[in-house]
Amino acid sequence: MQNNTSRKRNTPRSAGPKAPARQSSSKGRQGGSGKTYERRSAGSGRYFSDKQYKKKNSPAKAPKTEDDGLVRLNKFVANSGVCSRREADKYIEAGLVTVNGKIVTELGTRVSPTDDIRFSGERLKGEKKVYLLMNKPKNFVTTTSDPHAERTVMDLISTELCKERVFPVGRLDKATTGVLMFTNDGALAEKLTHPSYRVKKIYYVTLDKNLKKADFDAVLEGITLDDGPIAADSLSYVNGVQSEVGIEIHSGRNRIVRRIFEHLGYRVKKLDRVYFAGLTKKNLRRGQWRFLTEEEINHLMMGAFD
């Protein structure tokens, strides 16, 4: 995809003098049984023995946890391929998860892999982690189940080739096509969908009319939607056609690309995600999927989301 006109949003860097490091003064004293040393923390006026000083100024240690083989309930549920860990918290609070026949709603509960853990009555078991990539077609709903949906993305995944239960990572709306990942790894799914990780996404957008220069600039500089401000990281016309643009964005807010252009008075005719966390739909026809390669999985595990 060649871009004749492309711009990236400027991101100002914070600059300023560094705060001076705090210093501590030391003072030696002679004790009856030999030399001991006492130190005074800057500004405190108090003296401490070496042992007290080291204890006071050493970094806090992480609390010890007993290696008893127990895991958090939400992690077990997520790793069983039902959902992400955040979604597991909601299901637990809603009373949909039982442990050894009892409903558990307390977050932070730890369980043993040998416990009888059920979600909506169905027993869960740990599964090997699998990672899939799909070129999502139009008119398929991104969900694991929806009684009102005629077709879901799960209908496209062969249970013969992928026996593990997987779920979509994030969401593409029914009319949007392109890169969609699936996994049963709740921890990785959490990272790929959480805003703090700023996962890179690129969309190819076809509009109902040419994008004006003023609106082009506004998308980069930032606009305010009902749920807050938003700005694209990069924007370009595609092959000089001003009704077709490529937009790079890190936000995962619901229908964010469509809402950006609708806010400015445009209708999105086609929306295709061509890039997600370093993954593309190369060599995948619409509706096809494949397992990720070891190299792709390793990049995701290392947090190489760009």
Image (tube, rainbow, N blue to C red):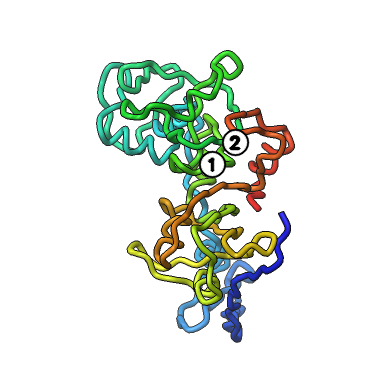
Residue nearer the viewer, 141 or 24: 141
Residue assigned mark 2: 135
Q: Which amino acid lies under the numbered mark 2 shown in the image of this protein?
A: Asn
142, above or below 238, in the image = above
186, above or below 22, in the image = above
- Residue 176, horizontal then vertical, whole percent: 49, 44
Residue assigned mark 1: 177
Q: Residues within 10 Å of mark 1 (few under 14, many from 20)?
A: many
| Relative to 180, 294 lies left or right | right
144, above or below 58, in the image = above
For the residues marked 1 and 2, what is the alpha-carbon distance in whole angstroms? Answer: 7 Å
Q: Secondary structure at mark 1?
A: strand
| Relative to 306, 115 lies left or right | left
Q: Residues within 10 Å of mark 2 (few under 14, many from 20)?
A: many
The answer, for residue 280, to whether it is visible in the render is: yes
| Relative to 62, 89 lies left or right | left
Q: Which amino acid lies under the numbered mark 1 shown in the image of this protein?
A: Thr
Q: Secondary structure at mark 2?
A: strand
Quadrant of the image occupied by residue 142: top left
Instruction: Report if the CB atoms under discs 1 and 2 are less than 8 Å apart.
Output: yes
- Residue 221, horizontal then vertical, whole percent: 52, 74
| Relative to 49, 278 lies left or right | right
Residue nearer the viewer, 215 or 13: 215
- Residue 270, horizontal then vertical, whole percent: 52, 49
